[in-house]
């Protein structure tokens, strides 16, 4: 029993160290996207819509063009659908144009801006991931968004201890050890580490900023 408790404490320290390293690395090397530099929840929601099944690097210019032309929800709700389509065309999935316009219309009619995940989920076209990502970015919630990319990194961080965990349980296991007040930054750090080194098939552990504390580095990743 004492041995198991000691191993659990050691694993917790290892995970805390990994997450601290992830955030520290992100502060210096994290990607710079326009939706990470705004405190406007509407713009973050639009970014989340554009990011669905699209690469972040491709979304950046589209996001910038969209809000340069229509800076506010009021502007977007009256925008010509064809003009919106023309701007988001490089991303494909052009049905998003109508979703953007609908969201802008509903947002512009709100008496109060949403301030939590539940309220964001009431908006048209907004699912759990987009709602959680927006709430985390706004510091409204400590409940992290999880997708296939972030879950890959978190499962590797936990190593064998991730076995059988669903996404929500996995996120709780990891984020309960996050540096205080850094939930948003940790979310972005995990996504950026996934893009830079923690690849799906052949991760670059030697270049990973958290490899010294990762539960899978140089072990289960090679299975």
Image (cartoon, rainbow, N blue to C red):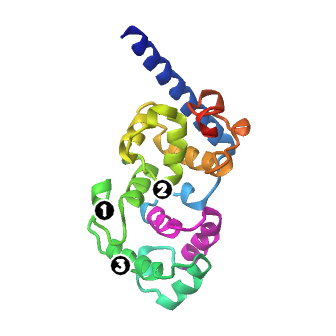
**Helix, strand or loop at mark 1:** loop
Q: Earlier in the sequence, mark 2 or mark 1?
A: 2
**Residue drawn at (67%, 44%) of the image:** 203
To which residue does mark 1 refer? Answer: 121
Which mark lies nearer to you, 3 or 1? 1
Q: Which secondary structure, mark 3?
A: helix
Position of residue 36 measured from the top left corner of the image (x, y, whole percent): 55, 55
Residue in the picture at 46% in, 86% down? 79
- Please state the extent of the stretch shown in magenta in the rendering: 43-69
Tell me where residue 152 appears, x and y as whole percent: 53, 47
- Left or right of 140? Residue 87 is right
Label 3, label 1: how far apart the Cα atoms are: 16 Å
> Could you tell me what secondary structure mostly forms the magenta stretch?
helix
- For image coordinates 50% across by 41% down, the residue present is 154
Residue labelled with disc 3: 105
Quadrant location, the N terminus:
top left
The label number, if any, that marks residue 193 in the structure image:
none
How many residues crowd around disc 2 within 10 Å: few (fewer than 14), some, or many (20 or more)? few
Could you give the CA–CA distance between mark 2 and mark 3, rounded to whole angstroms? 20 Å
Q: CA distance from mark 2 to mark 1?
A: 19 Å
**Res. 222 image quadrant:** top right
Question: Which residue was labeled with disc 2?
Answer: 39
Relative to 104, is 219 above or below?
above
Residue 199 among magenta residues = no
Pointer 3 local density, CA inside 10 Å: few below 14, some 14–19, many at least 20:
some
Residues marked 3 and 1 touching at CB (< 8 Å): no
Crowding near the residue tagged with mark 1, few <14, some 14–19, many ≥20 C-alpha atoms within 10 Å = some
Is residue 154 positioned above or below 54 on the image?
above
Which residue occupies the extreme right position in the image? 206
- Tell me which corner region of the image, top left, top right, bottom left or bottom right, holds residue 45: bottom left
Q: Earlier in the sequence, mark 3 or mark 1?
A: 3
Q: Nearer the viewer, mark 2 or mark 1?
A: 1
């Amino acid at each position: 029993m004492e041995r198991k408790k000691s191993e659990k404490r050691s694993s917790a320290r290892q995970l805390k160290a990994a997450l601290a390293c992830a955030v520290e690395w992100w502060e210096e090397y994290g990607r710079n996207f326009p939706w990470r530099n705004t405190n406007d929840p509407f713009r973050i929601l639009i970014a989340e819509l554009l990011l669905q099944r699209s690469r972040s690097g491709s979304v950046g210019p589209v996001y910038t063009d969209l809000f340069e032309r229509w800076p506010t929800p009021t502007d977007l709700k009256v925008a010509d659908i064809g003009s919106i389509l023309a701007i988001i065309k490089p991303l494909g999935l052009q049905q998003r144009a109508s979703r953007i316009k609908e969201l802008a219309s509903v947002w512009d009619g709100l008496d109060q801006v949403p301030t939590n995940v539940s309220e964001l989920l009431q908006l048209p076209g907004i699912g759990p991931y987009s709602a959680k990502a927006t709430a985390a970015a706004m510091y409204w919630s400590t409940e992290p968004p999880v997708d296939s990319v972030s879950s890959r990194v978190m499962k590797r961080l936990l190593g064998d201890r991730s076995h059988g965990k669903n996404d929500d349980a996995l996120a709780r296991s990891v984020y309960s050890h996050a540096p205080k007040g850094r939930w948003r930054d940790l979310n972005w750090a995990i996504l950026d580490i996934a893009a830079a080194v923690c690849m799906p098939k052949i991760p670059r552990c030697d270049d990973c900023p958290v490899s010294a504390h990762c539960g899978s580095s140089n072990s289960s990743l090679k299975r």
